[in-house]
Image (spheres, rainbow, N blue to C red):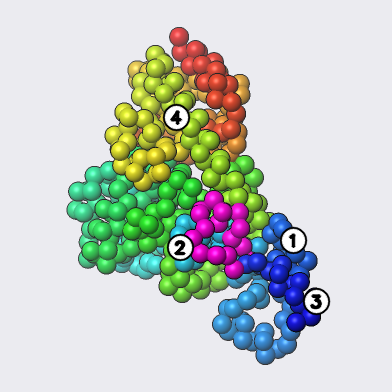
Amino acid sequence: MSDRASEAARIARAQLPEGLRPETLAVRTALAPSQHGENSEGLFLTSAFVQPDAATSARRFAQMEDFTYARTSNPTVRSLEQRLAAMEGAEGAVATSTGMSAILLLIMGLLKAGDHVVCSRSVFGSTLSLFGKEFAKFGVETSFVSQTDIGEWRAAMKPGTKLLFAETPTNPLTEVCDIRTLADLAHDAGALLTVDNTFCSPALQRPLALGADLVMHAGTKYLDGQGRVMAGALCGANRLIVDVFGPTLRTAGMTLAPFNAWVVLKGLETLSLRMKAQSQATLHVARWLEKHPAVARVHYPALASHPQHALAMSQQSGMGGAVVSFDVRAGTPEQAREAAFKVIDGTRVLSIATNLGDTKSIITHPASTSHGRLSEAQRLASGIGQGLVRLAVGLEHVDDITDDLQRGLSTLT
């Protein structure tokens, strides 16, 4: 072996040893570096890839191997997919342009007219609309059930049920479902279970290890972690990721841009540190809110008062995540909405926005933003009242966060 070949072999350290912990996989899993030996993964901004000859080009396009065209594959995107799959304990992953496009890919890849879905009614508002409205146009029926009542899930099952879809914890009430029980229910009926793991991320929760078939992510949130780009992903067995979703992605083009992939790839390197720090801070804030006289109820899985506290702690590595919601004390729905707006407008440090997962704490009113397109009946069925406020805790000093909440809550006295 020549000196140059020997050096290239030494640099290309893509084959990692077995048994590495998730924190290490989050830093090290990626394609091998180029001949230049870059330590930070390369960003490949190209729409096409030059082939060595026509025969190789024909083979690669026919078999969809290596890199041919950026709608089907890109080295930066592939590195992100490999890293996220390793962290989730999955055989493979496919990255998409947004979290909602990941759900769109899920539905287009798995379902057809006449198929049936059972979905928690407590999932994100856009998810409710996508299942209940958009795909109903194409003959896919969805039954919406209680997040926490397994009896409702079981009663909703039909001969044509192909998919169970759950988000745990939910947005914004942080309701938790029993992943293993839902997986057993799905598999007994020959269906698949998909879990939206956006709120916990693989740093806290790994649904595949609890029996789920697929994990879905809005990578826009904690996987990025700094509110910079949009991204989504599905993780699971290669029989689904490669054989089912691969052809659909190549045709429909929900493709993640390389730059966005690179940003999320870098975000994954600090995911575990951020989630642990933000979970600790959020528990402090939640306990503070529980004692505040202007707060009627606090929704946070790490609190002993949470209805699914024990289940959440067993599934989520003993942590509650970084989102807490609370109901302000008020009378009528109109008064509750006015009170919630006063609290939000009274803050000076927190960002008023609809995102979450940022290093900057974000406060929002779900009934008029993330769930604003739902009817009042749909919102109430999901437990989302006009007095509900959601806080996604970032990395500011926790006392500055509670001081700012006090500014807002003091407007009610």
Q: Residue at x 51, y 50 (%)?
A: 218
Which residues fall within the magenta stretch?
Answer: 15-31
> What label sits on residue 90 in the rendered view?
2
Type of amino acid at the residue the image marks with label 1: Glu
Mark 3 / mark 2, whichever is N-terminal: 3
Observer able to see residue 324? yes
Q: Which mark is residue 265?
A: none
Tag nearer the camera, 1 or 3: 3
The residue pinned by badge 4 equals 283
Position of residue 268 in the picture relative to residue 185 (left or right): right
Identify the residue under disc 1.
Answer: 38
Can you give x and y, in whole percent of width and height, for residue 182 in the image? 28, 54
Cα–Cα gap, marks 4 and 2? 30 Å
Q: Is residue 310 magenta?
A: no
Determine the secondary structure under disc 1: loop
Whole-number angstrom distance, CA of label 1 to CA of label 3? 19 Å
